[in-house]
Image (cartoon, helix red, strand yellow):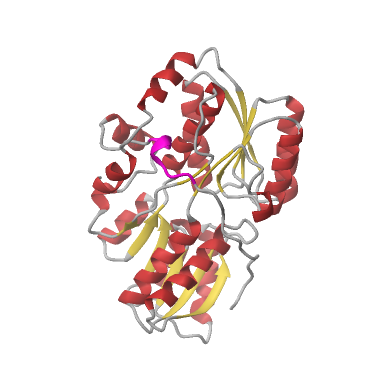
Amino acid sequence: MKIYQKLFIGAGLGLVGLMGSTAITLAEEIGYVLAGPDIYYATEAELFQKLAEDAGHTVTVANSEYSPSKELANVEDFIARGVDIIVLLSANAESGTQAALRAKEAGIPIFFVAALPSPAGYDIPTGIVSGDWIDMGKTVGEYVGKNHPGKNVALLEGVYGQGIAEMIRKGFDTGIANANGGNEVVLANSAGWNRKDGLAVTQDFLASSKEFEVIYAMNEEMMAGAIQALEEAGELGNYALFSGNGKEIGWSWMRDGIMEATVANPPTLEADLNFQMVQAHIAGIDYPRHVYNIQPLLTVDNLDGAVPWVIDDYLAMKASGKLVVDLFAQPEIKSMEVWEASGSSN
């Protein structure tokens, strides 16, 4: 609790009243494009839609199924329909940049959430709420290096080309280098952000000739597959496990001693910041164009402050005053890291 309160209590409370009083007259039609069927994305869209519809807006959600061409088609469809605003959770950085350009040419504001455009397209979107992906990886890398020096690492990475997995990997490599613990990544492959591929990739890792003692899955869905593979192989408990995003199932794994740590990146909180940004734009209020989601390291020792993914629990935490989410209290990000497309290294 203290982690988030310290970071979120701040200015901007007047915005809430302003938005509440102008929601009807400023009602907009919003097109929301999802990268794929990942539970993180679905949770993000569901909360945004609830907040927006409660404010009087209309939200239509489209899913790109991780296809860059379908992503562009979804954005073009919303442009043709004449929506007032587009929110894009991009499946691919290059197609995201193209989508942003087309929306801009059509005079439609486009807001990116979670994923980023390619570095060349960073200045195009009207607003961005994203994870600090490099810092996420760096946090885990430094923790692994300090607490498991000399241990080899196997990585379950996200979808390549989106930019998120590549930036997390860049940060992780920096983190283990900073820790100077002599760790080495000996296996790495995409597990597509999902547990089915997490299972298959971990099975491949276990069957390989590589020796490793640490597994880092970049989200809890992939970690669920990894844990299943370890259980089936009779190896659960023989590896130090780390993840990202801070989903509730990860809290249980840490309490049960199965997983050591994760970096929180709750889609609920991110969707809330995204909604506040869209509302500020509609109301003509100046706002920070790019802000990061809040991403503390979670261990069994600080789970009392973890922010829920379950929407009802998240809203109840806000209503209780234990969580204050304020877009205007967040530092504005002025640039983004350059990254290169990733590929399998196993």
Q: Identify which residue, 111 or 336, lies in the foreground.
A: 336
Is residue 183 visible in the rendered image? The answer is yes
- Left or right: 128 with respect to 239? right
Q: Position of residue 313 (x, y in %)?
A: 33, 37
Q: Position of residue 51 (x, y in %)?
A: 46, 27
Q: Quadrant of residue 321?
A: top left
- Looking at the rendered image, the quarter that the N terminus falls into is top left
Q: Identify which residue, 28 or 208, lies in the foreground.
A: 28
Taking the spot 51% from the left edge, 26% from the top edge, the residue there is: 285
- Left or right: 127 with respect to 226? right
User: Is residue 131 shown above or below 33?
Assistant: below
- Looking at the rendered image, the quarter that the C terminus falls into is bottom right
Taking the spot 54% from the left edge, 49% from the top edge, the residue there is: 334
Q: Identify which residue, 171 or 259, lies in the foreground.
A: 171
Q: Which residues are magenta?
A: 326-332
Is residue 228 visible in the rendered image? The answer is no
